[in-house]
Image (cartoon, rainbow, N blue to C red):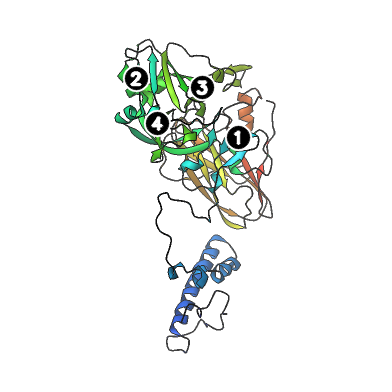
Amino acid sequence: MSSEQQPTGNSRTGDEYPTDASPDSEVPNEATSISRRRLLSGAGAIGTAFIFGKSTELAAQTEQSSPILDPSSDTSKVLGTPGTELGQRSPHEKISRFLRPGRPWTSGTPHEDLMGTITPSDLHFERHHSGVPAIDPAKYALLIHGMVDRPSVFSLDNLKHFPSVTSVHFLECAGNYPSRPDENTRPSRVAPLLSNSEWTGVPLRILLEEVGVDPDASWLIAEGQDAVKMNRSIPIEKAWDDAMIAYGQNGEPLRPEQGYPARLFNPGWEGNTSIKWLRRIEVTKQPSMTREETVRYSEYTKGNKIRQFSFVMDARSLITSPGYPETIRPGFVQIQGIAWSGRGKISQVEISVDNRKTWQPAILQEPVLSKSCTRFHFPWQWDGEPAVIWSRAKDETGYRQPSLDEHKASRDGRRGYHTNFTVGWNVGADGEVAYYPQEDWKT
C-alpha cells in the first residue's frame, strides 16, 4: 500500500477494521497491523484513564488523533536539514524570557515552561542597573588589592589557569516578588528573578591565598565594570567558604548579561552580592556602606529596626503547574514545582490541597543539591470541587517557609526584600487555575 493509500486516523471506522479480524480474514495484513497498533494504543490509554480516574472519552480522543496514523507527519520520506555551527530550538518551541513593562534592565525566567532544574543560559533572568557592558575578554583585568601582601592583577587567562570548581546553584534577586499580583499572575511572574545554573570558576579563596591576606582583614569590597560601578561589601568568611570567580555557566562562557567574562558568585546569597563584570576586589577591615547596602537591599524587622546585611536567601517554594492560565480536568493531576534555600539542601516540601487545613509531603526529585533548586511533585486526585493548593519548603537547617501572616509579623507589617512567604493557586469548579491573591500590606 502506498503512502497515499494508507488510512489516516479519521479515514476509517472501527467497522472497517473489526476487532475480531484474524490473520486468515480478507482484511489486508498491513491494515490488520495498523488496526492492532491502534487497538493496543487505545487499550493503553483506556487503562491509564481507569487508573487515574479520567473518562474513557480522553482515551478515545488520544487513539483517534494518534499522529502515527497520519502520513503527513511521517518525516522519514524526505531528507532532514544538515548540521549547523550553532544549535537552535525547534521552531515549534516558543519559550523565551519575558520583559517587565517599563523596566528594560530586567527580564524573567519562564519557570512554567522549563523542565528539570537547570535554567538554559539564554533563559536565565537578567537584572542590571546601567545596561550590559561590552567587554573584550583579551583586555579583561581583575585587580585584588588593599590589605594584602601582593596586590595583583589577573587576566582572564590567569584565572583559567588556577584550579577550577563546578557546582550547581540558584541565583535569586532579593526583590523577587511582584508588587501587587492579581489572579492573572503566572508562576513565572511570582518569582521571575530566580534561575539555577551550573557555574564554573576559580574559588576566591585560592586567589586570596595567592595575594596574601592581612590577618586583620574582615571584609571585601567587590566592584563591577558596568557604568554604575555596582559594588557591595562581602564578609571575608564567604570568600574562605564557597565564593568563586565564575567565568563559565552551563558548560560555556558566561553570557554578557550574566557578567561576561567573569563575575563574583556567592552561592545562596542575594543576587546583588554576586557582582557581575567584576574588575576589582579590595580587602578591607570594614564594610564600605555603599548605596546598595544602605538605601537599598535592607528590610524592616521587629521593633521598627532595619536589617542591613541580610545576605542569605531563605527557603522558598513555587508550584509551577497547575498555575494560571492552565485548565485542569477532574482526575489525576500532577502538582509540580521547584524549591530552593540559600542555607543548604531542601529537606522537605509539603503540599496542601484543602487551603492549608492539612499538609502532605511531596516527592523530591533527585538530585537534591545544596543551595540549588530542587524539583518536587505530588499526585493529586482532584474531585472537581473548588480547591486552593499551596506548597511550603523546609531546608536542612530546620527553617520552614513562613505563611504571609508569619512573614508580616517578622517585618512589623512592612514589605521589603527577601520576601518568601507561601503562595497558593485557586482551582475553580470549571478547572480554571488562577493565582490566589493574599492581603497586601504597606511598603
Q: How far apart are marks 1 and 3 (CA)?
A: 18 Å
If you read the primary sequence from the N terminus, does the residue marked by circle 1 or circle 4 appear first? 1
**Residue under label 2:** 208
**Residue under label 4:** 137
Kindly report which numbered mark, 4 or 2, lies closer to the viewer in this rendering: 4
Q: How far apart are marks 3 and 2 (CA)?
A: 22 Å
Q: Position of residue 339 (x, y in %)?
A: 50, 39
Query: Looking at the image, do the residues carrying marks 3 and 2 touch, with CB atoms under 8 Å apart?
Result: no
Task: Tell me the residue at 51%/26% (across/down).
Answer: 272
Disc 2 secondary structure class: helix
**Residue under label 3:** 229
Q: Which of 139 and 399 is in front in this view?
A: 139
Disc 4 secondary structure class: helix
If you read the primary sequence from the N terminus, does the residue marked by circle 4 or circle 2 appear first? 4
Q: How far apart are marks 1 and 4 (CA)?
A: 25 Å
Type of amino acid under label 4: Pro
Q: Distance between the residues labelled 3 and 4?
A: 18 Å
- The numbered mark at residue 104 is 1
Query: Looking at the image, do the residues carrying marks 1 and 4 touch, with CB atoms under 8 Å apart?
Result: no
Q: Nearer the viewer, residue 75 or 403?
A: 75
Q: Where is residue 300 in the image (x, y as percent from the top left)?
A: 61, 21
Whether residue 329 sits left or right of residue 393 in the image: it is right
Which image quarter: residue 130? top right
Kindly report which numbered mark, 3 or 4, lies closer to the viewer in this rendering: 4
Disc 1 secondary structure class: strand
Q: Distance between the residues labelled 2 and 1?
A: 36 Å
Type of amino acid under label 2: Leu
Q: Is residue 258 above or below residue 44?
A: above
